[in-house]
Image (tube, rainbow, N blue to C red):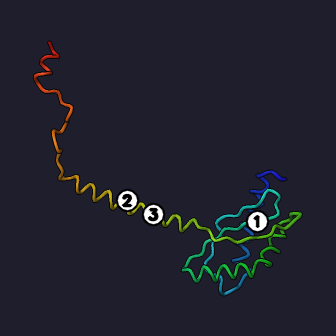
Amino acid sequence: MTDTARARKLADRIQVVVAQTLERRIKDPRLGFVTITDTRVTGDLREATVFYTVFGDETEREATAAALESAKGVIRSEVGKIGVRFTPTLTFVADALPDNARNIDDLLDRAKAIDAAVRTTAAGATYAGDADPYKVPASERDDEDE
């Protein structure tokens, strides 16, 4: 087993190499606007998971996934030039982070709308009873002063 610092350094280097290879060497027309968001390497440095996002609709995401899968050998050979004893196998995974962020933004917008509706309803509202139900009647206050 290696230490996690070395695995993290290798993951960072793999991320850069994969991004540069996609930009410069891979000329597949199916490859959309891809961003490599993260890379994780196992503790034994044998497997690397590359997370990516694609700008576009579902068909562009599927086409990009197919293009990455077909270019995996070329990308792995570029990663092998880093200088590690064993070139890790690459697995490409579509990153769910943008979808989760969009979902959170939608939920926050809905919560703001509900808060605004409550605020407008509460603006003209009055208390059902006294404003302060715990007020002490004046006659009892006079008794306490004595």
Q: CA distance from mark 2 to mark 3?
A: 10 Å
Q: Which residue is mark 1?
A: 48
- The x and y percentages for residue 37 are 64, 66
Q: Which residue is mark 2?
A: 111
Mark toward the start of the polypeptide (2 vs 3):
3
Category of crowding for the residue at label 2, using alpha-carbon neighbours closer than 10 angstroms: few (below 14), some (14–19), many (at least 20): few
- The x and y percentages for residue 7 are 78, 57
Q: Residue at position x 33%, y 59% from top?
A: 114
Mark toward the start of the polypeptide (3 vs 1):
1
Is label 2 in a helix, a strand or a loop? Answer: helix
- The x and y percentages for residue 65 are 66, 78
What residue occupies the far right of the structure in this picture?
Answer: 85
Q: Which residue is mark 3?
A: 105
Q: Which mark is residue 86?
A: none
Identity, as a three-letter code, of the amino acid under mark 3: Asp
Q: Are marks 2 and 1 in contact (CB under 8 Å)?
A: no
What residue occupies the far top of the structure in this picture?
Answer: 146
Identity, as a three-letter code, of the amino acid under mark 2: Ala
Q: Are marks 2 and 3 in contact (CB under 8 Å)?
A: no
- The x and y percentages for residue 41 are 76, 61
Left or right position of 142 against 38: left
Q: Are marks 3 and 1 in contact (CB under 8 Å)?
A: no
Is label 3 in a helix, a strand or a loop? Answer: helix
Q: Residue at position x 21%, y 31% from top?
A: 134
Left or right position of 106 against 71: left
Category of crowding for the residue at label 3, using alpha-carbon neighbours closer than 10 angstroms: few (below 14), some (14–19), many (at least 20): few
Q: CA distance from mark 3 to mark 1?
A: 31 Å
Identity, as a three-letter code, of the amino acid under mark 1: Ala
Q: Residue at position x 14%, y 12% from top?
A: 146
Q: Is residue 60 above or below residue 4?
A: below
